[in-house]
Image (tube, rainbow, N blue to C red):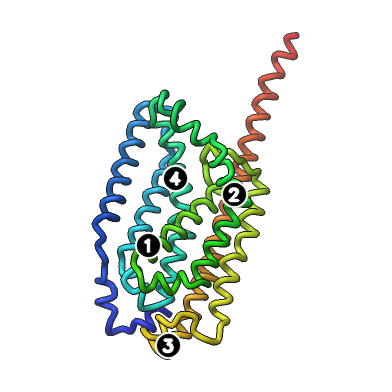
Amino acid sequence: MILAHVGIGTMTPFLLSWTLDPPLLIAIGLTVIAWLSMVRRVNRAHPHSRVAAWRSNAFLAGLVVLLLALQSPIDTFADDLFSVHMLQHLLLSFVVAPLLVLGAPVTLVLRFARRDVRRRLLLPVLHSRALRVLLFPPLTWALFAAVMWLVHFSPLFELALESEPVHQLEHLLLLGSGVLFWLPAIGGEPLPWRMSWSQRLLYLFIGMPLSSLLGLVLYSETFVLYPHYMFRVGSAALDDQRAAGTIMWVGSDIISMVAIGLLVWAWSQADARRAGFRARETDNARPASTNR
């Protein structure tokens, strides 16, 4: 659908239209260096309790997707095509955010920090009342819903198309609310609130309609919501808007279903480990009772 709007003749400039934002590139580069340095130090200090490779890879993959979302042709053409803009939003909220959360960066920082820094600075922040309120699962769910609908159904969206600072604020809102949303469900951090496996599944399941309905509304509209895109693509704007709705609707549902499936698998693995531990405890207790 996106290619149909762009046109075959313009595919080459589309693919070559990378935006190089030095502050963002430097920030991502420094984050990668810091991450690898912390992982190396933690693994060296704890060879029998190394940082899980899959967590590290997830975090780094999140940074790569962040770079693609904000520096590749996706960002360049987001102002021209609503469908591309929606792809960018999908990547930030449903790909970058959960990948960063899966990396468990807070846990890595806690393991990396000196004991006095951890005790005097990091742990008090983690146990603070403000963070406990912010990370309350119903609130993180509500914030994610509010941001998703506010961004797409308020003057903020049209303003972001005309103002780069507002556009960057839009990105921060989507990524920040996405991280908060995914953290209680799939995070491996020492959070003040711990949900059971069934609660996590329910949390994600009732979160699916948020983006699905948003995409469905965009797809079903019979008029162009944003004059900016009418000016850019003319009569193709309504088709482009329907493509954007489809991207959010289908894309978010697929990602959510994958997340739910992985959560069910992780739950079964945890149950299997717990059953194995109980079986070993029972086996170890038998000789002792026999000797008595």
Amino acid at dot 1: Gln
**In terms of image quadrants, where is residue 206?**
bottom right
Identify the secondary structure beneath mark 4.
Answer: loop
Amino acid at dot 4: Gly
Q: Are marks 2 and 1 in contact (CB under 8 Å)?
A: no
Left or right position of 117 against 133? left
Amino acid at dot 2: Trp
Taking the spot 55% from the left edge, 55% from the top edge, the residue there is: 259
**Which residue lies under the disc numbered 4?**
103
x, y percentage for residue 122? 45, 33
Q: CA distance from mark 3 to mark 1?
A: 26 Å
State which mark lies toward you, 3 or 1. 1
x, y percentage for residue 258? 55, 58
N-terminal label among 2 and 1: 1
N-terminal label among 3 and 4: 4
Q: Is residue 104 above or below residue 281?
A: below
Along the viewing direction, whichever of 201 and 222 lies nearer the viewer = 222
**Which residue lies under the disc numbered 1?**
168
Q: CA distance from mark 4 to mark 1?
A: 24 Å
**Which residue lies under the disc numbered 3?**
236
**Which residue lies under the disc numbered 2?**
265
Identify the secondary structure beneath mark 1.
Answer: helix
Amino acid at dot 3: Ala
Along the viewing direction, whichever of 214 and 121 lies nearer the viewer = 121
Q: CA distance from mark 3 to mark 2?
A: 43 Å
State which mark lies toward you, 4 or 1. 1
- How packed mark 2 is, by other alpha carbons closer than 10 Å (few <14, some 14-19, many 20 or more), is few
N-terminal label among 4 and 2: 4
**In terms of image quadrants, where is residue 44?**
top left
Left or right position of 29 against 275? left
